[in-house]
Image (spheres, rainbow, N blue to C red):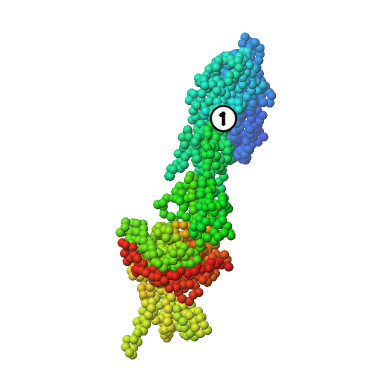
């Protein structure tokens, strides 16, 4: 066998790592025991011979292949340990971190291999960049060092210990290096199994160089670029030192300021291009007073380079209005405002300086906008203009003073500037920001109708300026628009408005007319820069007169630009008063017995503003007052005969009439505009304002306003005149189809009815039985529904035409002692339109009815219970003398029973029956039977049908609500309950006629009826054009309206006519405009069925939006517009009830339960009606009660047993061209009664 096989087992001896063993066998293996071979190598796999290894106490050195063999060995576990490395090995290797291999398993016939890997020490070589002689030292981190000398620039230290080393190179002295000097120290770190070569770069000697293109720099000018470099390649740093003038410059690099340390700035490295820095002048230096020194830091460098510079500072100073220089920062940011105007002091002084004084060159003063907005002068007043740009030669012996003014507004704030350039050093080394501002006052003339006030011409706005009036208490005098204009709008200047006197007041832009809480601007008024944001709009103010200016003089309003100029613009005003002339005379022509005081108040009851006594001899007086509306009171002495007389104001001239509050102040009222329609009850505040306007006189400027008053005796008798005519029917000529529009048709119908009324009035006046004495009041009244067209009611907005047209007649002088009640007019206001929806997928109906009957408490039918059977039959009628027979309609199941005890023996039984048949609502019998086999039907006595209803399930897009109607063929019902089941599937219950049943599977129609609010209005007017006035200037009522609170079932045609069902809230239906099922709503505020926001007497009123107030509800109307039924006219208190209101005791109940002490009692009770007679009179003990009905008339002195009889009666005439049948169903009749003493006036106590 060969040495590659075991002689015992013939297996090849193979090492897993190195292959077959290439050596002779050292022993036979008769026992076939195992062994351990240990391989020692480095990390690269190279065998290391001669290394001692110990296994099982034996130590063997590795052979040439790096293998130490231990065999034979007994079976077991062994450890291999590395011995001490011999010197020849230790210089190149270090032991492994783990020098022991544990757990080597040995078994018979097997050789186990273990490895120990030595760590090779690193090698270190230093190579210089040039082949020069040098000594290289490497120092280990623990301080151990090695040194080598080289002639060719290479030092090879061979294997070294791992770790960090410092490498130092010292060059030998030679021609380039006159002395030994260390080079830059290097740091290097080496580890096992590494080979490190450390390169060392050696530098050539270079010189520092400073480069720049000029010797001066200016504060605010261009930066000076300086290049700091070396004359050749250089590895190292440098240092810049400011040797002088450090405070005058700033050093920047890459636009970043570089901080200096003791005047020095160090740079660690330089590139081939060197270092570029920028120098920026921050203040003037001495001439050539800035020194720079540049030196290189490193080997082989030359001496430092140096240069000198000059920092130049040129300044431009602008002065304020008071010749004080503006702070530099402010001058360069906000700057100075220049006023474009002709006022003295508009120019601003500018001072130019330059330092150091020795610097020679040239400066240029320029305008940023090329002279478009600025002009330069030598002094403050000279007309000589200097050119821009303007040149100044340096050096300057003294600062140069110039003056600048604005000639055009700047495009924007700060958009103009004077700039100072220094030739070659920079443009704009200094500048001052300027804003040329054109600040003006615009004064406008009066506002034209529908337009904007036009500005006065510039030549007129100061002289003559604008005429104003001293503002009156009602702020009716127009204010003048004043606009402060500023261009540019963003100019950073404060404006000031001032006035030398107190003749005018200014208000903010929103106060063209007076507003509560407004306050005048305090003069002088500062206008801050941000108050004007739009140059065209400016700042709007409104000027009004505060005090009269003396004749021929005016007051002014001046505009200043604060800190720029005073009096840059001015406007003028004259302020005047108005004149009123008041004349007072007696009606009987006699002279006044004593002086009468004329008092002017803002409103009746307010404090006296102006007053003056009128003497009997003059009979008139003149007052100068601010234009306004005034309540003019005429106060006679308490002891004079005139104190008991009535005060009548003659018709006012047109200029003295107070316009409606919606009319522009000072503008005449629009004669074509319709007054507000009578509608919902007017609020107390609104009514008071309306009354105050009606009582007041407008005093206007210009010619004196003349007002004439007559003192007349009180009425001591009343004559009643009835105009009875059949009303109530739907008659009329208000056919929209015939006349083209509803408005035209309604106007035509009302006009014709007014013509008929006027003819009746004139006929009554012509009667010889009419009392002509001025102390007798004639009361003319027509019945309810006099003004009603063919559709049942007029649009409510048309009702105003009644009093408007009747006033044309009643204003005539011949009616001066008359009073008229024009019956009533019916108006409607749409609330909702009729809605119709389809009901489909109708399910099987459930029909039920509710019956009631009275019976003995012990009767068997009193014990009826749920689940009993009810039978409905026809009332029995005789079919032969001996036979009675009645038709059975069907049976139903009793689902609910209520038994109420009425007395000890009698009970009232109410049963609800489900599944009822169709049966007549009258002429039926009801019998009940217990659910037992032998039970018999027991008839109930006099059954009463309380309710007949059905329930359906159906599909509908909207859930029907209470008050809707349901239709199916001839069936009509009223929905009283609805619920949504799922999606658009609904369940509804509805009342229906008992003789018609709904059908399942047949579609139905669901109707939400149209709703309309009804206005039944009685119009009352005082005759004659004069107005009754009280001593405090308040007006007695000369016109008013009274609302009817209730709606009767006979007021309108329709399904519910004369039917009690009408008064049920969900119904209340009648025919209106052809719609048979219109739901009628009483006037809002009414306490009637379906009334909204009811105002109960003696309770706080409710606004239309439902908001409660603290104002007490009363029937006594103070202003005639609230609809109350008690009013005072001609000094006499009347109560007026329209038809059903009288039956409902509207007045009687008020005075019985709600009237409060001090309220007037009714002297004359008026009742216009259509189907009513006197039932509940309400007046003082000697009062008069007067009823004019569509079918009769009646007059009565309260407390007398008999009614008054007419003194004269005659048919009322019909105007030519009018057919009575078109409007009324019978001819009218005039009844004139004997004059009666005026009832005694009284108040509630």
Pick whichever, 313 or 702, lies toward us. 702
Q: Does residue 571 lie above or below 218 as drawn? A: below
Percent position (x, y) of residue 209? Answer: 58, 14
Pick whichever, 870 or 189, lies toward us. 870
Residue at image coords 59%, 27%: 320
Pick whichever, 1216 or 1120, lies toward us. 1216
Q: Quadrant of residue 1005?
A: bottom left
Q: Residue furthest toward the top?
A: 175
Judged left or right of residue 2, residue 290 is right
Judged left or right of residue 1170, residue 24 is right
Element type at mark 1: loop
Percent position (x, y) of residue 463? Answer: 50, 34
Percent position (x, y) of residue 136? Answer: 64, 18
Q: Residue furthest toward the right?
A: 143
Q: Does residue 355 lie above or below 342 as drawn? A: above
The answer to whether residue 33 shows anywhere in this view is no
Pick whichever, 942 or 515, lies toward us. 515
Q: Does residue 870 lie above or below 1217 as drawn? A: below
The answer to whether residue 795 shows anywhere in this view is yes
Looking at the rendered image, the quarter that the C terminus falls into is bottom right
Residue at image coords 30%, 59%: 738
Percent position (x, y) of residue 548? Answer: 55, 42
Q: Does residue 32 lie above or below 1053 as drawn? A: above
Judged left or right of residue 415, residue 1049 is left
Residue tagged by mark 1?
Answer: 564
């Amino acid at each position: 066998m060969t040495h590659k096989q075991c002689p015992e087992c013939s297996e090849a001896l193979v090492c897993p790592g190195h292959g077959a063993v290439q050596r002779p066998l050292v022993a036979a293996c008769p026992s076939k025991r195992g062994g351990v071979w240990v391989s020692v190598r480095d990390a690269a796999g190279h065998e290391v011979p001669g290394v001692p290894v110990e296994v099982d106490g034996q130590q063997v050195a590795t052979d040439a292949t790096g293998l130490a063999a231990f065999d034979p060995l007994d079976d077991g576990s062994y450890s291999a340990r590395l011995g001490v490395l011999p010197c020849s090995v230790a210089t190149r290797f270090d032991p492994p971190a783990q020098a022991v291999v544990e757990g080597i398993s040995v078994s018979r016939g097997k050789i186990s291999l273990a490895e120990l890997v030595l760590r090779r020490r690193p090698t270190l070589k230093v190579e210089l960049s040039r082949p020069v002689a040098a000594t290289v030292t490497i120092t280990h981190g623990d301080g151990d060092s090695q040194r080598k000398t080289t002639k060719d620039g290479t030092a090879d230290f061979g294997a070294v210990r791992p770790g960090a080393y410092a490498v130092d190179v010292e060059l030998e002295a030679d021609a380039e290096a006159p002395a030994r000097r260390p080079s830059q120290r290097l740091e290097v770190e080496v580890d096992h199994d590494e080979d490190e070569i450390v390169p060392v770069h050696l530098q050539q000697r270079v010189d520092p160089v400073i480069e720049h293109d000029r010797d001066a720099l200016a504060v605010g000018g261009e930066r000076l670029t300086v290049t700091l470099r070396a004359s050749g390649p250089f590895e190292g740093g440098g240092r810049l030192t400011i040797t002088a003038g450090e405070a005058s410059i700033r050093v920047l690099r890459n636009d970043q300021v570089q901080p200096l340390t003791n005047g020095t700035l160090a740079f660690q490295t330089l590139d081939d291009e060197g270092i570029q820095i920028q120098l920026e002048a921050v203040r003037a230096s001495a001439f050539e007073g800035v020194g720079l020194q540049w030196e290189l830091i490193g080997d082989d460098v030359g001496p430092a380079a140096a240069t000198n510079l000059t920092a130049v500072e040129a300044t431009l100073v602008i002065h304020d209005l008071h010749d004080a220089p503006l702070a530099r920062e402010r001058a360069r940011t906000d700057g100075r405002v220049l006023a474009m105007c002709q006022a003295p002091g508009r120019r601003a002084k500018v001072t130019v300086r330059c330092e150091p004084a020795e610097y020679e060159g040239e400066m240029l003063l320029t305008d940023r906008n090329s002279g478009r907005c600025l002009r330069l002068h030598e002094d403050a007043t000279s007309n000589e203009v200097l050119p821009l740009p303007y040149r100044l030669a340096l050096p300057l012996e003294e600062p140069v003073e110039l003056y600048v003014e604005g000639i055009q507004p700047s495009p924007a704030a700060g958009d103009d500037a004077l700039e100072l350039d220094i030739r070659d050093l920079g443009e704009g080394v200094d500048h001052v920001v300027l804003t040329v501002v054109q600040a003006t006052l615009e004064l406008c003339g009066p506002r034209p109708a529908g337009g904007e006030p036009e500005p006065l011409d510039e030549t007129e706005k100061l002289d003559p300026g604008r005429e104003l009036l001293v503002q009156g208490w009602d702020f009716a005098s127009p204010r003048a628009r004043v606009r402060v204009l500023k261009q540019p709008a963003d100019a950073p200047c404060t404006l000031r408005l001032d006035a030398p006197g107190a003749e005018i007041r200014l208000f903010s832009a929103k106060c063209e007319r007076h507003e509560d809480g407004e306050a005048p601007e305090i003069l002088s008024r500062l206008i801050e820069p941000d108050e004007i944001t739009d140059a065209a709009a400016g700042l709007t103010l409104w000027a009004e007169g505060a005090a009269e200016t003396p004749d021929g003089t005016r007051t002014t309003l001046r505009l200043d630009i604060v800190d720029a100029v005073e009096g840059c613009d001015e406007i003028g005003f004259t302020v005047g008063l108005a004149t009123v002339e008041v004349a007072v005379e007696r009606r009987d022509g006699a002279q006044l017995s004593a002086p009468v005081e004329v008092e002017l108040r803002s409103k009746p009851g307010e404090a006296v503003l102006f007053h003056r006594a009128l003497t009997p001899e003059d009979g008139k007086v003149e007052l100068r007052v601010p234009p306004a509306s005034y309540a003019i009171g005429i106060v006679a002495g308490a002891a004079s005969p005139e104190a008991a007389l009535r005060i009548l104001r003659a018709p006012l001239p047109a200029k003295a009439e107070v316009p409606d509050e919606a009319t522009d102040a000072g503008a005449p009222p629009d004669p074509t505009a319709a007054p507000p329609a009578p509608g919902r009850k007017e609020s107390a505040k609104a009514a008071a304002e309306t009354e105050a306007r009606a009582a007041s006189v407008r005093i206007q400027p210009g010619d004196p306003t003349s007002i004439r008053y007559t003192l007349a005796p009180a009425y001591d008798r009343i004559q009643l005149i009835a105009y009875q005519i059949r009303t109530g029917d739907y008659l009329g000529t208000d056919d929209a189809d015939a006349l083209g529009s509803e408005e035209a048709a309604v106007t035509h119908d009302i006009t014709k009815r007014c013509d008929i009324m006027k003819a009746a009035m004139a006929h009554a006046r012509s009667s010889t039985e009419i009392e002509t004495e001025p102390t007798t009041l004639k009361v003319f009244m027509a019945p309810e529904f006099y003004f009603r067209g063919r559709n049942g009611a007029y649009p409510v907005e048309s009702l105003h035409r009644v009093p408007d047209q009747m006033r044309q007649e009643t204003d005539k002088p011949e009616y001066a002692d008359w009073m008229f009640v024009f019956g009533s007019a019916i108006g409607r206001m749409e609330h909702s339109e009729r809605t119709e929806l389809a009901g489909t997928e109708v399910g099987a109906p459930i029909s039920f009815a509710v019956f009631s009957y009275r019976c003995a408490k012990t009767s068997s039918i009193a014990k009826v219970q749920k689940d009993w059977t009810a039978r409905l039959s026809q009332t029995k009628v005789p079919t032969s003398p001996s036979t009675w027979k009645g038709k059975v309609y069907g049976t139903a199941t009793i689902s609910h029973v209520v038994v109420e005890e009425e007395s000890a023996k009698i009970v009232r039984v109410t049963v609800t029956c489900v599944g009822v048949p169709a049966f007549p609502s009258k002429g039926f019998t009801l019998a009940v039977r217990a659910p037992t086999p032998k039970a018999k039907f027991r008839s109930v006595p006099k059954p009463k049908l309380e309710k007949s209803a059905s329930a359906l399930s159906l599909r509908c897009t909207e859930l029907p609500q209470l008050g809707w109607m349901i239709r199916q063929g001839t069936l009509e019902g009223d929905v009283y309950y609805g619920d949504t089941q799922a999606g658009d599937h609904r369940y509804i219950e509805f009342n229906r006629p008992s003789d018609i049943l709904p059908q399942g599977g047949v579609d139905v129609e669901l109707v939400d009826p149209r709703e309309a609010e009804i206005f039944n209005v009685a119009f009352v007017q005082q005759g004659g054009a004069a107005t009754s006035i009280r001593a405090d200037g308040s007006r007695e009522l000369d016109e008013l309206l009274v609302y009817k609170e209730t709606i009767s079932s006979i007021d309108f045609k329709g399904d519910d006519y004369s039917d009690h069902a009408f008064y049920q809230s969900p119904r209340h239906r009648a025919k209106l405009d052809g719609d048979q099922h219109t739901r009628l709503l009483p006037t809002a505020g009414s306490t009637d069925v379906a009334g909204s926001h009811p105002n109960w007497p003696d309770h706080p009123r409710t606004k239309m939006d439902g908001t409660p107030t603290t104002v007490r509800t009363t029937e006594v109307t103070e202003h005639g517009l609230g609809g109350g039924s008690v009013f005072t006219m001609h000094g006499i208190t009347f109560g007026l009830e329209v038809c059903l209101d009288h039956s409902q005791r509207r007045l009687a109940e008020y005075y019985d339960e709600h009237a409060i002490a001090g309220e007037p009692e009714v002297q004359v009770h008026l009742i216009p009606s259509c189907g009513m007679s006197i039932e509940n009179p309400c007046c003082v003990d000697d009062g008069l009660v007067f009823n004019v009905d569509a079918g009769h008339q009646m007059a009565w002195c309260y407390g007398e047993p008999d009614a008054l009889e007419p003194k004269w009666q005659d048919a009322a005439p019909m105007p030519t061209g009018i057919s009575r049948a078109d409007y009324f169903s019978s001819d009218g009749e005039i009844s004139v009664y004997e004059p009666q003493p005026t009832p005694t006036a009284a108040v509630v106590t």
